[in-house]
Amino acid sequence: MYYIGLDVHKRTISYCVKDAAGKIHQEGKIGSTRRELDAWVKTLPQPRMIAMEATIFTGWIYDHLLPHAEKVKDTHPLMLRAIAAAKRKNDKIDGSKIADCLRCDFLPECYMTSTEIRDRRRTLRYRGLLVKQMVQMKNRVSGLLLEKGVTHTKQRLHKVGYFAELMSSNEEIDQSIRPLLKLSREHIVRAQKLEYALVSSLERDPLLTERLKRLRTVPGVGPITALTWALEIGDVSRFRSIKQAISYCGLCGAERSSADKVARMPISKQRNKHIQHVLVEAAKLAPRQNHELALIYEKEIERGNRNRATLAVARKIVAYLLAVERKKQDFVPAEKFGGTVAA
């Protein structure tokens, strides 16, 4: 078996090919294009395994090389301490270190979802970008009115009828900001239509329809939460326990233990930020829809910390979602079984 380490960049890829004994057979650099990859693969010895560091643009390289190797693995950048802590660091050395980690089975491999899920996840994350832009534009409209001291009702500002009435009847709106207000409103409307179209296309996708239908039976889980879970989590079988899923979603703190001393740290930054944000927002509303979640929230809120109460509810939602996914059944409340409500 030959072990190949790739140090991937936007325009170039540095590679190192080693055998099982660690002897270098090939080293060099190629361009990050499909044509050069195809020509390079033909020069490699067989059988082979390939590893590369996960970046924003390694997805297509992974897919392109997958048919040409026994295995292709993505590595977690934060776990490659041998590279990060080295005194000398360059592309050539990085490729060699990745090949050594692969050869010795010390590679900190990260999960790679299927191409179909990654394509749909890209659409959902683009929807998140649209929402951010809409919020920024709405804040800008409010700011323009405040700069000119225009009397308005903030809660109704972005309703179509109210905004049109405000523009036509309010004499406090200066002519200098009217074009900006109209332009901002048009941008918001276009973004809303595009956002709706993106979500609708994902909900109607045959690959996701049945899965989303089951997930939405969980209390507090709406269309966006269900879509985010399905596309960010991918295959739930990769989580051996609920704790692993909770950790991936960023709903627990880090731990630092040494001898008999255990220190609990704040919420870790090593998480999937997209699903963390959606689950926390869902947890703020879920206690209103489910008695069991309401009891969990009330128990934690008695200790005087709303954030911990919200995280406790979010962790329970993760447990519900994981159970629904594993059993491939709709969620059934505990009351229907006649059992006691979990605290």
Image: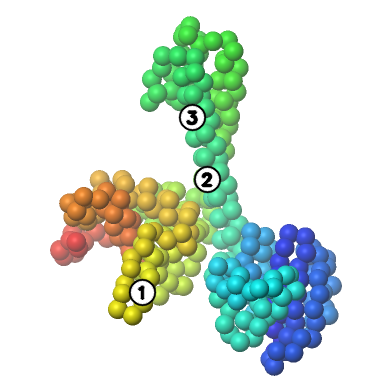
Looking at the picture, does residue 111 appear above or below residue 129? below
Whether residue 250 is visible here, answered yes or no, is yes
Residue 118 lies, in percent from the top left, at: 58, 60
The secondary structure type at the circle numbered 3 is helix
Kindly indicate whether the residue at mark 3 contacts the one at mark 2 (C-beta within 8 angstroms): no
**Quadrant assignment, res 157:** top left
Residue 166 lies, in percent from the top left, at: 46, 14
* Sooner in the amino-acid sequence: mark 3 or mark 1: 3
Q: In which quarter of the image is the C terminus?
A: bottom left
* 131 relative to 21 in the view: left or right: left
Residue that mark 2 sits on? 128
The secondary structure type at the circle numbered 2 is helix
**Residue placed at 76% from the left, 68% from the top?**
13
**Residue placed at 67% from the left, 64% from the top?**
58
Residue 259 lies, in percent from the top left, at: 33, 80
Q: What residue type is labelled 3?
A: Asn
Colour approach in the figure? rainbow
Q: What residue type is labelled 1?
A: Ser
**Residue placed at 55% from the left, 37% from the top?**
133
